[in-house]
Every structure is written in C-alpha cells, then in structure tokens.
DNA sequence: TTATCTGTTATATAAATAGTATAACAGAAA
DNA sequence: TTTCTGTTATACTATTTATATAACAGATAA
C-alpha cells in the first residue's frame, strides 16, 4: 500500500488519498473486504497527519466505497450499491467534463473511444 | 443571461458561474464571439461581488473558453483549440468519475449510453 | 492482565481559499 | 465629457485545509 501524493498539487491531500484508494478499488488492486492501513500507519507512510487520512476514509465510507469498523479499522466495502442520488451526481459531474470536451471539438466517437479506453484499463491485468 | 446560483451549495460561487457559462457555450446558447455581461452587471444580477464573477471569467479565459478584452469586456472564444495538456487533464478527471461508476457496477454499455445521452443533449434544440 | 492497536473526539494553531466591500486606474466608446 | 470595461489595491470575515497533541473506549494479542 504505497500510494503517491503530491504536496504541491492544487488538489487537497485528503482528495488525493481518496482518489488513489478509489482507483485501487476500481482496478481490483484493492479487493472487496480488503483491509486498509490504519490512519496512523498510512499517515506515517505518506508524511501526513492522521486526521487527513481519516478525512479521506470518512469520505470513502460516506460514498459507500469503504466500511469503517471503529475498533478494527477500515475495509473496502463488500457490495457497492448505486443509489438514484449517485446516478444523478455522476451525470452532473460527467456533464461538466463532457461539455469541455464537446466545446473543444471532441466528437462523440472520440469521446466514446476515450471512455472505453479508460474503463478497459480498470479490468486490464497489471 | 439569467443563470442560477445556489448560495447554499458546497460548490464555490465562482465555480457555479464558471460551469453555468460553460454549459451555455456547450449547448450553443452562448455562441462563439457572443459578449458576456460585464462583471459588474452579472454580479448585480446574481447578488454577488464583481470579483467573484471576475474570477469565473479569468478561469474561463485561462481554459480557452472565453477571451477577455480589458476595455471591451469578455466574449465567448471564436476557436477552441484542444492542447495535449487539455486531453491529459480531461482523461484524468474522467478516470475518477468512471472509476466510481465502474465500482458501483455500471457496465461499459450503460456508461456509453449515459455519455451519449449527455452529449446529445448539447446539440439538441431547446 | 496488560500492552497495543483501532477510529474517534477534543482543542489549538497556522495557512490558504472564498467572498465581500470600497476605491481608484486607464483606455474604449458614445 | 461621461460612461463603461477589466484590473489593481487594500481590507476584512468566514471557511477550509492541514498539522499537532492528548485522551477515550473497545478489540485483540502477548
């Protein structure tokens, strides 16, 4: 569990940690039920305060990607249910990104190809 | 030019303004070369400080969607060139969103359908 | 039993961001 | 000449981000 963070990035540290773990789950590197390092351990590895890691974990749990057991630690969730609200949020966020691509002249086909390429990378062996 | 902002949103006001104008350009409601309201006028309409509007305009100009003429005002850009850096940023941002969808069980086909639906909305008549 | 580990809570502090308010500037345009 | 444009400057408040340190209560293992 050695993930990269960039202190000079415009992205908050807790967001970087959130996204790194999210990608780990998406690629299967972090399997359902897998245990995450404790907030103190990961904070130590990254040179980051435990509260910063804790915020990432709380957000991941809030979004249904992680289950937190107060006394045992954090684990990748076992089942990922998508709610109506999640679909709505996804659509809204996608709309902004796709608007940028559309304005920049990216065609529907080019966009579909890009999307397919990204999704296939999730299931590709390392 | 009456766009909606939500003071209670977690999104910063300048981001909401940025995205509203972006969507206006994507749908063609704001045509290339069209003039945007002055920072004072839009700020007045929205009940927002002119510096907040100005920040939105600066970011839109920075991203190539708007051209600012110091003495004439802000206009929708005439040509939208996509640079290598822009493609990279788009791919990275898309990857996070698609990772969430992928984990939540959205299939490639379902995702493609969603993407197509969003892009078609840009070109659909009002 | 005791020591260690877990996330959590509390408190405090510093830096950056978000947003407002007001004033002034210089050039374009009517 | 007046009005309009984005810009710059200064000041202020509130929130967010991040760190630091300490303590708590339950689980777990020596």
Image (spheres, coloured by chain):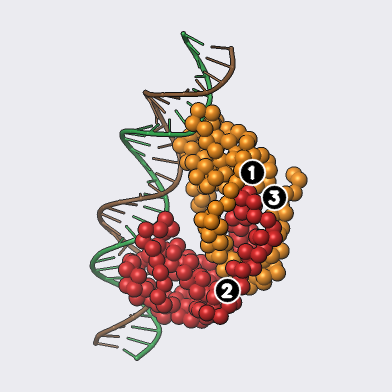
Chain colours: A orange, B red, C green, D brown
Dot 3 and dot 1 within a common chain: yes
- Identify the subunit bearing mark 1: A
Mark-to-mark CA distance, 3 and 1: 9 Å
Q: Nearer the viewer, residue B126 or B49?
A: B126
Marked residue nearer the N-terminal end (3 or 1): 1
Residue appearing at x 48%, y 66% in the figure: B19
- Identify the subunit bearing mark 3: A
- Vertical placement of residue A26 versus B56, above or below: above
- Identify the subunit bearing mark 2: B
Question: For residue D9, which quarter of the picture?
Answer: bottom left
Which SS class for mark 2? helix
> Where residue A64 appears, x then y in whole percent?
54, 45
Horizontal relation, residue A12 to residue B86: left or right = left
Mark-to-mark CA distance, 2 and 1: 33 Å
> Where residue A94 appears, x then y in whole percent?
57, 62
Label 1 Cα crowd, 10 Å radius (few <14 / some 14-19 / many 20+): some
Residue appearing at x 56%, y 40% in the figure: A66
Which SS class for mark 3? helix
Q: Mark 2 sits on what residue?
A: B122
**Count of marks, rendered view:** 3
Query: Which quadrant, please, contains the N terminus of chain A?
Result: top right
- Vertical placement of residue A68 versus C23, above or below: above
Q: Residue furthest right?
A: A125
Q: Tell me the tag on residue B98.
A: none
Q: Mark 1 sits on what residue?
A: A24
Which SS class for mark 1? helix
> Where residue A81 appears, x then y in whole percent?
58, 48
Q: Mark 3 sits on what residue?
A: A122
Residue appearing at x 62%, y 64% in the figure: B114
Residue B76 appears anywhere in the view: yes
């Amino acid at each position: 569990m050695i993930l990269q963070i960039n202190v000079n990035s415009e992205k908050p540290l807790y967001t970087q940690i959130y996204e790194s773990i999210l990608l780990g789950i998406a690629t299967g590197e972090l399997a359902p039920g897998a245990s995450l390092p404790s907030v103190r351990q990961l904070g130590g590895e990254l040179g980051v305060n435990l509260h910063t890691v804790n915020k990432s974990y709380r957000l991941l749990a809030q979004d249904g990607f992680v289950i937190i057991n107060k006394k045992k630690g954090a684990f990748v969730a076992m089942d990922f249910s998508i709610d109506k609200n999640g679909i709505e949020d996804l659509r809204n966020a996608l709309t902004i990104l796709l608007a940028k691509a559309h304005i920049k002249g990216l065609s529907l086909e080019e966009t579909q190809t890009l999307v397919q390429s990204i999704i296939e990378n999730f299931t590709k062996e390392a």
